[in-house]
Amino acid sequence: MIPDFQSIMLPFLTIISDGEEHSTIETNQKLAEHFNLTAEELEEYLPSGSQKTFPNRVAWAKAHLKMAGLLENTKRSSFKLTDLGKALLDTKPQEINLKFLRTIPTYQERIGRTRDEDSLSDSDVSQISATPEEVLENSYLAIRKSLAQELLFKIKSSSPVFFENLVVELLVKMGYGGSIKDAGRSIGRSGDEGIDGIIKEDKLGLDVIYVQAKRWENVVGRPEIQKFVGALAGQGAKKGVFITTSRYTNEAREYQPRNETKIVLIDGEQLAGLMIDHNLAVSTVNTFEIKRIDNDYFGDE
């Protein structure tokens, strides 16, 4: 299990307790060994996929220790224990966390005090386990999930024609078909049994993708997918996309055509996610940028 950033603080200081210069890569490796992290845990990413969870938590542990004056940077990605840090370790503390750091004058001075911080008890501070990025990203995911559910409700309440046009517009926004006008035959108007529409795979129309769109509440099973594959075979087609507002059974997802036909299944949750990613039927309310120090500007080696 990946430790929270407060649990990393004391082992971090212990690893660099020799007073010599240590690198970020070296320290992260030793911390991973200390906590017996598996390869899978070391590859775990934050919800956004922007960075790995463990290095992120180590970085925040280091940031707080640095604000407390317990370690100092010697050059880019390298640091060492300070005299204050050594003196602290000589007292053999059982734990170092935010509650402990709040007792250090240097830390209090550097972080400042806010009304929110003043309202937090030492017990509340000790219970904080998520880094700021994790709090932000988990909040984002909660907002995104709520938006996706609202989108699906709107889609299911719309007319079949509206859904057909929505599917075409989404595929165009994803890079298929060029423009809405040139995308291909609109969903629901192809007239081919088991096929709801045809869209160009690229702007030149060198290949086409056959589409099945189901604005359903019922779960889509394997028979529906087999029927779609059969319809593709009848057209001599090799590529198809099956889109539904509901979901697929495990049997449907595990089904693999024996021929070279390639089928992509998109359920309601994925459909809403793609609409959000490609800004279809949604608008941006706020944008937050996360920034970091540009070490090149300061000439750090």
Image: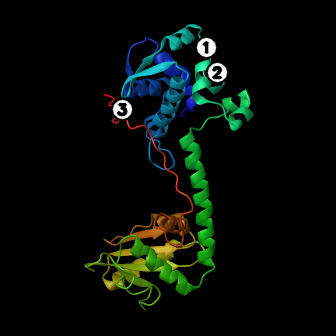
Q: Give the number of the disc on residue 173.
A: none
Residue at disc 3, secondary structure: loop
Q: Earlier in the sequence, mark 1 or mark 2?
A: 1
**Mark 1, residue position:** 93
Along the line of sight, the residue nearer the viewer: 151 or 281? 281
Please say if the residues under marks 1 and 2 sit with CB atoms less than 8 Å apart: yes
**Residue type for callout 1:** Pro
- Distance between mark 3 and mark 1 Cα atoms: 35 Å
Along the line of sight, the residue nearer the viewer: 18 or 269? 18
Along the line of sight, the residue nearer the viewer: 234 or 48? 48
**Residue type for callout 3:** Phe
- Quarter of the rendering occupied by the C terminus: top left
**Mark 2, residue position:** 100
Residue 195 visible at all: no
Q: Earlier in the sequence, mark 3 or mark 1?
A: 1
Q: Residue at x 31, y 71 (%)?
A: 260
List x then y, in percent, for residue 162. 54, 84
Which class describes the residues within 10 Å of circle 1: few (<14), some (14-19), or many (20+)? few
Residue at disc 1, secondary structure: loop
Q: Residue at x 43, y 12 (%)?
A: 19
**Residue type for callout 2:** Phe
Please say if the residues under marks 2 and 3 sit with CB atoms less than 8 Å apart: no
Q: Earlier in the sequence, mark 2 or mark 3?
A: 2
Q: Residue at x 42, y 84 (%)?
A: 197
